[in-house]
Amino acid sequence: MPALVFDCDGVLADTERDGHLPAFNQTFEEFGLPVRWSDAEYAQKVKVGGGKERMRTLLTPDFVATAGLPSDPAALDEQVAAWHRRKTEIYTGIISSGRIPPRPGVRRIAEAAYEAGWPLAVASTSAEASVRSVLELAMGPELAARFAVFAGDVVQRKKPAPDIYAFAVRRLGLDPADVVAIEDSRNGMLAALGAGLACAVTTSAYTGEEDFTGASLVVTSLGDPPPRETVARVLSDPRAVHPGPYVELGDLTGLLTADADPGVRGDTAADSTPSDPRPH
């Protein structure tokens, strides 16, 4: 049975620029930290998987001294965790306000997959509370309840490591060869491919210029038909599924059945065993 696994940020909603970035900066302000990330700076930070991990990029010796932070590693970890908890609260507030719309086609595709009997999941390096808030925004409460959610620190290594996808596939009892992942970034794509999954990419605010060699399909979005028409522009279609103006479930099925180029997926499957996963 085929299955569908979504990334969260940039896939379910384009949340990085208008959600995560302002939440980070408000957190820094509330804690009196001498930093505010610009849009250009954050475009580089999004390449670091995980919110706490992005925050830790600040922790140079000079920054720690200037901000009056503890030098003891355990105390510093506690401080980062406190920042991240507050950032998650701010972010979920932004999402619940409805200011950020779902991306085109995600609910349509998920509904079609559910009706066809496909298992549904989200695999993300964001905090679970953040992921669930975006999932409910994008899918509505009833459909969101049908999703398994694998998020945050359920594995230690974040994307581009394949751990989160390998963990999700194993917990759901799936064959990786039957799973389509939908991602928006190169790091996410590499994680999906490393776990042996087919990967469709919908580019997002910060990822349009990234290298998606290895993806089974790259589009600007999944698209939607009228009355809320959004056309999915095809950027790469190496498996020749030839989607129309909006991607259909049959196109995703085609990613599992079409002949793949050698080495397109599963190159790093040997490395896909999660490191020290904790129970979900």
Image (spheres, rainbow, N blue to C red):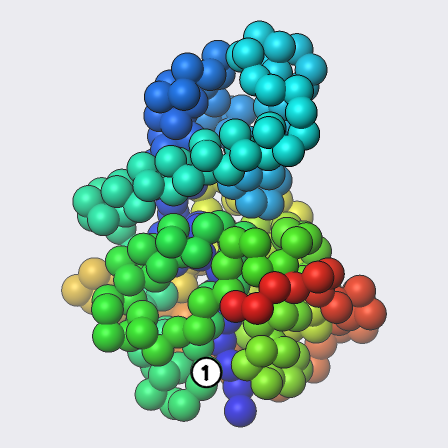
Q: In this view, does 215 lie above or below 100?
A: below
Whether residue 35 appears in this view of the structure is yes
Q: Nearer the viewer, residue 143 or 152?
A: 152
Q: Which of 125 and 221 is in front in this view?
A: 125
Q: Which of 120 and 152 is in front in this view?
A: 152
Q: Name the element at disc 1.
A: loop
Q: Which residue is drawn at 38% across and 51% down?
A: 130
Q: Residue at x 31, y 55 (%)?
A: 133
- Residue 142 on image: x %, y %: 24, 75
Q: In which quarter of the image is residue 114?
A: bottom left
Q: Is residue 42 left or right of residue 245?
A: right
- Residue 95 on image: x %, y %: 28, 47
Q: In which quarter of the image is residue 199?
A: bottom right
- Residue 78 on image: x %, y %: 54, 34
Whether residue 240 appears in this view of the structure is no
Outermost top residue: 66
Q: Is residue 8 left or right of residue 139?
A: right
Give the residue type that dot 1 points to. Pro
Q: In this view, does 73 lie above or below 153?
A: above
Q: In this view, does 6 lie above or below 98?
A: below
The residue at which mark 1 appears reads as: 119
Q: Which residue is drawn at 69% across and 69% down?
A: 195
Q: Nearer the viewer, residue 20 or 259?
A: 20
Count of marks, rendered view? 1
Q: Is residue 136 above or below residue 254?
A: above
Q: Is residue 137 left or right of residue 167?
A: left
Q: Residue at x 63, y 59 (%)?
A: 155
Outermost left residue: 227
Mark 1 is surrounded, within 10 Å at the Cα level, by few (under 14), some (14 to 19) or many (20 or more) other residues, namely some
